[in-house]
Structure formats: C-alpha cells, structure tokens
Amino acid sequence: MQPSVARHIYLRRGVGVGALKKLHGGTCNRGSRPSHHVKSSGSIARKVLQALEKINVLEADENGGRKITVDGQRDLDRIAASVAQARA
C-alpha cells in the first residue's frame, strides 16, 4: 500500500488520512439491500503516512495533508524512469 499512497500524493499534493480512507474503501454488503461504498480504516492510512514520513518521502503540508519531499520526489522519479526503461 505504501507505493500506491506515495504515488497518489505525488500526483495530488495535500492528501490526508480522510482522502486515503475514501480512496481505499470498498463496498459494504447490506444483505438484500443494494451495496454502498464505505471508507476504509483510518488507522491503516495514518500508519502508512507515518511510515512514509519516517523514511523522509513525505512531509506535512502547510495547507493540511501531506506532500512529497524533494528526496522522495527524486526517488519516485528514479523508480519511474527504471520501470519505463524496462518496459521499452
């Protein structure tokens, strides 16, 4: 889940726990009634963000949420380039 969260925040800065809960949620089986989307656990999203902050990929944004650090952006760009080169 960590790489997908890092990529999501790379593409859209200012993402917080609430946005990740909505993103990684799923359907709720309500028996005979139609299913509806429900949010995922906030604990998991929060711990993923804390783990990415610990390895200096993310940092807190001034406007709320998180953003990619300079080192994190460099690492993600390097990984994306190597994947693109491997596919070509």
Image (cartoon, rainbow, N blue to C red):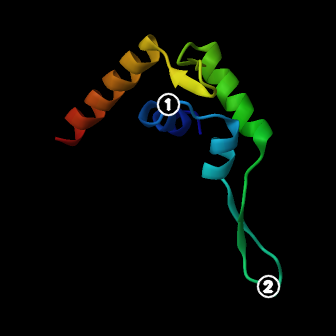
- Neighbours of disc 1 within 10 Å: few (<14), some (14-19), many (20+): some
Q: Name which residue lies at 69% across and 46% down.
A: 21
**Residue marked by disc 1:** 13
Q: Name which residue lies at 40% across and 20% down.
A: 73
Q: How far is mark 2 from mark 1, CA to CA? A: 37 Å
> Which of the numbered marks, if any, corresponds to residue 33?
2
Q: Quadrant of residue 26?
A: bottom right
- Residue 36 lies, in percent from the top left, at 71, 71
Q: Total number of numbered labels? A: 2
Q: Is residue 48 above or below residue 34?
A: above
- The answer to whether residue 73 is visible is yes
Q: Name which residue lies at 65% across and 27% down.
A: 49
Please tell me which of labels 2 and 1 falls first in the chain. Answer: 1
- The answer to whether residue 24 is visible is no
- Residue 80 lies, in percent from the top left, at 32, 31
Q: Is residue 15 left or right of residue 81?
A: right
At label 2, which amino acid type do we have? Arg
Q: Is residue 76 left or right of residue 43?
A: left
- Neighbours of disc 2 within 10 Å: few (<14), some (14-19), many (20+): few
Q: Is residue 62 above or below residue 41?
A: above
Q: Quadrant of residue 44?
A: top right
**SS assignment at label 2:** loop
**SS assignment at label 1:** loop
Residue with the most extreme left position: 88
At label 1, which amino acid type do we have? Arg
Q: Quadrant of the C terminus?
A: top left
Residue with the most extreme bottom position: 32
